[in-house]
Each structure stands twice: as structure tokens, then as C-alpha cells.
Image: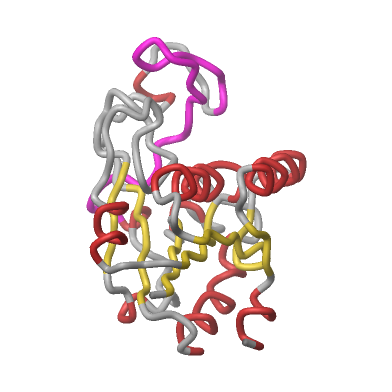
Amino acid sequence: MKALLIIDVQNGFCPGGNLPVPEGDTIVTIINRLIEDGAYDLITASQDWHPANHGSFASQHAGAKPFDMGTLSGQPQVMWPDHCVQGTPDADFHADLNTNAFDYIQQKGENPAVDSYSAFRDNDQAAITGLAGYLRAQQVTELDVCGLATDYCVKFSALDARAMLPDVKVRFIEDASRGIAADGVKAAIAEMRQAGVAIVHSDEILAD
């Protein structure tokens, strides 16, 4: 069973959103092409789904500005702009993304006391989501990961897929993802490769 995991392709991370990733919207066409090619048995997606009082928001800390470094529950934390608040347009998937093809959506980041980059577990690794269990139940043997942003949620999701699903072949689709900072993307790709995640291009998948 071969699955695609689409990470956080939401309005909040696209141009015009509250925490835009440069050119974040340009991957939608590539992802739709992958979905519609029929290369996958299963289409899954994650969705950042924060309460309005989430502790990773700079607005929740007196004197903090977006992108300052602070702490959350005793751990270092980037102070983000308010983004992907539950039930707001910012949290919606990009309007052009083929969400009708989704078999499973994993919402994340609901606990205000801890941030959640990975689709599989919170950053403190204390609480897991239902995604790994779902993929096991579906007997997934290959998982391709893409989306927003390469140097944060995509990287941590791919690394957790390797750690939590050791028998699953995990690949990162580079051109179907975008990152926040060039240096961060380069480091993220190196870290994923070191962990055993294969780096691929959508053309390779479509050519199979």
C-alpha cells in the first residue's frame, strides 16, 4: 500500500496567509498532479488546527514579537504570528487543492501548551496523533511526504514517519514542498537523508 502525506497546505502558509511560506501556493498544482496520476492507494493530509490561545503565538506572551525566541512549557519556542486558528479561513486548505481525494485528515496543534510540527506527535513527543495507527491499519508500506514547510512541519513529519513506522519506506518530494529559509531547507534535507528518508522529485513518481 502506497500513501501520500500532504503537510499543512493551508491558506495560513500560502501568500496572503498569516504565516506565509514563500511560493507556498506553487506546490498545489504539483500535488494535484500527483493525486490525479493514480500513483497512490491512499491520500492523507495534516492540518494545523490551533486554538486561539495557543502558547506558540507571540500574542499570548507580553512583550513578545513574532519570530522572537521564547519558551513554551519550559522548552525553547519560536513565537509565531497567530495562524491556522480553528474554524478561520486561515486554517482552511488551499482552495485549489484537491481535498475531495483525501482519505484521512490529521489535525494537529490543538494543545495550547505545546507546539506540534509533526503530523505524528507533539514537539515534546509525549502525545501522539492517530496518524501512525491509521497508516499501520491500512498496511502502508511506502509513504511519500510533501507540503509546507520543508524546514519545519514536513521535516519533522518525515523524521517521525521513519522513527514510528520503521518498516515503511519514506520519501520526501522536494519540488512538491517549500520552506521558510534556504539554509533551513538545505539542513532539513540533509537531516532527512541522514535518517534514511529518500529525496525524490515529482517527475520520478509520475514516470513510474
Residue 86 located within the stretch drawn in magenta:
yes
For residue 112, which quarter of the picture? top left
Decide whether the magenta segment is chiefly helix, strand or loop: loop
Quarter placement of the C terminus: bottom right
Q: Is residue 126 left or right of residue 98?
A: left
Query: Residue furthest toward the front?
Result: 167
Q: In this view of the protein, which residue sits in the foreground, 94 or 72?
A: 72
Task: Indicate whether 92 appears above or below 2.
Answer: above
Task: Indicate whether 58 appears above or below 121.
Answer: above
Q: Is residue 99 left or right of residue 183?
A: left
For residue 120, which quarter of the picture? top left
Residue 162: where, in percent of width, then height? Answer: 49, 48
Q: Residue at x 47, y 67 (%)?
A: 142
Quarter placement of the N terminus: bottom left
Q: Residue at x 61, y 69 (%)?
A: 26
Residue 157 seen in the current view: yes
Residue 53 seen in the current view: no
Residue 118: where, in percent of width, then height? Answer: 42, 43
Q: In this view of the protein, which residue sits in the foreground, 40 or 1?
A: 1
Residues rendered magenta in the picture: 67-88
Q: Residue at x 32, y 74 (%)?
A: 102
Residue 70: where, in percent of width, then height? Answer: 49, 15
Task: Indicate whether 168 appears above or below 155.
Answer: below
Residue 143 located within the stretch drawn in magenta:
no
Residue 149: where, in percent of width, then height? Answer: 56, 50
Q: In this view of the protein, which residue sits in the foreground, 93 or 139?
A: 139
